[in-house]
Image (cartoon, grey):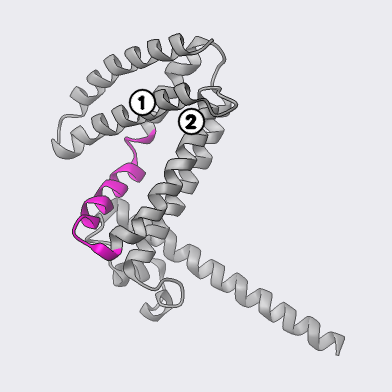
């Protein structure tokens, strides 16, 4: 009897491992499709083909295409946040830390996560199902981003004034990061405007920091 129970438990773990492996392959493929082809090009057929799986496999893991896309964004954000936390731990102390942290955020919002998220957000404007699904991840990402930024700016605890500066910095970065998206070829102009904005933001952080 004990051998039978052990066999059942082993089979269950094996099935869970296979399921997790399949889900991870689908998410990896969805992330790659989002980055390369945008939301419109991230079809279930293309994702399954890239993952080397049958089309039927995707239905066991995601109810809809919107669910798959949002989960892919969540996974991409989770990976990027892990990288950001590691990079934040290497930031120097003192006044230089703020400028380096701001530049780190600028790099973050000029990468594949931001571009993919913008594409999905635009699609969600006219897609109620996608918009509803996206709202939950936006709230989650907002909380995680703020928590990560507090560590980057050496704020051990929540502080209203510091949080407002962080949110303002994020808003400025998002706005400038959108410029090359809306106006292709304007990256140099965006970088120049960011250099000016970074100096002003660093000055505000210096005033707010005791």
Report how many numbered discs are placed on residues in the image: 2
Looking at the image, which is closer to me, 145 or 41?
145
**Residue 105 image position (x, y, % from top left):** 40, 30
Mark seen at residue 149: 2
Q: Image check: 34 left or right of 156? A: left
Q: Quarter of the image containing the C terminus?
A: top right
- The magenta region covers 108-129
Q: Quarter of the image containing the N terminus?
A: bottom right
Above or below, comparing residue 161 to residue 72 in the picture: above
Q: Which secondary structure lies at badge 1?
A: helix
Looking at the image, which is closer to me, 122 or 28?
122
Q: Please report the residue visible at 28 percent of the width from the left and 44 percent of the height from the top.
A: 115
Mark seen at residue 181: none
Mark seen at residue 169: 1
> Callout 2: 10 Å neighbours few (<14), some, many (20+)?
many
Q: Please report the residue visible at 38 percent of the width from the left and 30 percent of the height from the top.
A: 167
Q: Please report the residue visible at 55 percent of the width from the left and 17 percent of the height from the top.
A: 92
Above or below, comparing residue 175 to residue 137 in the picture: above
Quarter of the figure with residue 28:
bottom left
Q: Which secondary structure lies at badge 2?
A: helix
Circles 2 and 1, Cβ within 8 Å, touching? The answer is yes
Give the distance between the C-alpha atoms of the residues marked 2 and 1, in whole angstroms: 10 Å
**Residue 54 image position (x, y, % from top left):** 39, 78
Quarter of the figure with residue 145:
top left
């Amino acid at each position: 009897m004990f051998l039978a129970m052990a066999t059942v438990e082993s089979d269950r773990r094996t099935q869970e491992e296979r399921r997790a492996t399949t889900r991870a392959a689908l998410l990896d493929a969805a992330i790659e499709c989002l980055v390369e082809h945008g939301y419109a090009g991230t079809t279930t057929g293309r994702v399954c083909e890239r993952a080397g799986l049958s089309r039927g496999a995707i239905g066991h893991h995601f109810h809809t295409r919107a669910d798959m896309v949002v989960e892919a964004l969540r996974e991409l954000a989770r990976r990027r946040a892990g990288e950001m936390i590691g990079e934040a731990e290497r930031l120097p102390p003192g006044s230089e830390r703020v400028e380096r942290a701001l530049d780190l955020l600028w790099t973050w919002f000029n990468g594949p996560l931001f571009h993919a998220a913008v594409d999905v957000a635009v699609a969600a404007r006219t897609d109620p199902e996608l918009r509803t699904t996206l709202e939950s991840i936006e709230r989650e990402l907002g909380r995680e981003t703020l928590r990560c930024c507090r560590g980057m700016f050496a704020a051990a605890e929540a502080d209203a004034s510091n949080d407002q500066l962080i949110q303002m910095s994020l808003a400025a970065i998002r706005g400038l990061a959108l410029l090359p998206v809306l106006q292709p070829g304007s990256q140099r102009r965006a970088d120049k405007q960011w250099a000016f904005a970074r100096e002003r933001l660093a000055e505000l952080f210096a005033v707010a920091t005791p």
